[in-house]
Amino acid sequence: MFIITEGGPKALDLNFTKEVKKRSKQEIELCFQCQKCASGCPIAEYGEVDTNQVLRMIQFGLKDELLKSKAIWFCVGCETCGARCPNGIHIAAVMDALREMAIEQGITPAEKDISLFHQCFLDSVKSYGRVHEGTMLMRYKLKSGHLMEDVGVGLKMFLKGKLALFPHSVPSKTEVRRIFNWAQKK
């Protein structure tokens, strides 16, 4: 089945909505496009589609287009959208499900190095039980080759006390690692 768009016909995957709903445990069909999620999203200006549009694309079965989009990788999981949703849809869980599906299908993210950044973030959480921005960013910069980009911003953040020099570990670090190990087995 196809839908006609400005860019030409797009293939529809009629099982896509069911799959995302199953993985995210969210009632995606409850979205009635009030746009409260998008109006509060701190990264809305960086993606090519807003959070409400992501939900609509899922409802319409636009799997290929959505899994290749930047929007699913830019979501920071802050839950602002979920807190604003009148129907209680936790869109961060939906975005997690979409990223998982993209990775499983070997889809290269539209944004260069975003999957590397994502992996560096997860590695930091796995190592320390929480993210340590300094270590995470250094790993990312070394692996991506973007060593000197954002140095000024990083220095300003450090001087304002926003980047800790040493990582702070959490007491439940082994529990966090256990969760990562469990998730890798799935």
Image (spheres, rainbow, N blue to C red):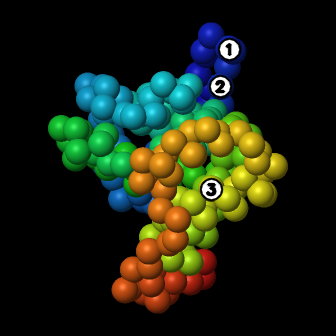
How far apart marks 3 and 1 lie (CA) works out to 37 Å
Could you say where residue 186 lies in the image, as x and y percent from the top left?
Answer: 57, 77
Q: Secondary structure at mark 1?
A: loop
Q: Earlier in the sequence, mark 3 or mark 1?
A: 1
Q: Label for residue 137?
A: 3
Mark 3 or 1, closer to the camera: 3
Q: Nearer the viewer, residue 129 or 16?
A: 129
- Residue 21 visible to the viewer: no
116 sits left or right of 145 in the view: left
Asked if 175 appears above or below 4 in the picture, the reply is: below
Q: How many residues crowd mark 2 within 10 Å: few (<14), some (14–19), many (20+)? A: some
Instruction: Tell me which residue sits at (54%, 76%) in the image.
Output: 126
Q: Can you identify the residue that label 2 sits on?
A: 10
Q: Residue furthest right?
A: 145
Could you say where residue 85 lies in the image, as x and y percent from the top left?
Answer: 23, 39
Q: Amino acid at mark 3?
A: Leu
How far apart marks 3 and 2 lie (CA) works out to 37 Å
Asked if 168 appears above or below 13 in the picture, the reply is: below
How far apart marks 1 and 2 lie (CA) works out to 8 Å
Instruction: Tell me which residue sits at (62%, 56%) in the image.
Output: 137
Q: Image quarter for residue 81? A: top left
Q: Residue furthest top?
A: 6
- Quadrant in which the N terminus is drawn: top right
Q: Amino acid at mark 2?
A: Lys
Q: Nearer the viewer, residue 157 or 141?
A: 157
Q: Amino acid at mark 1?
A: Gly
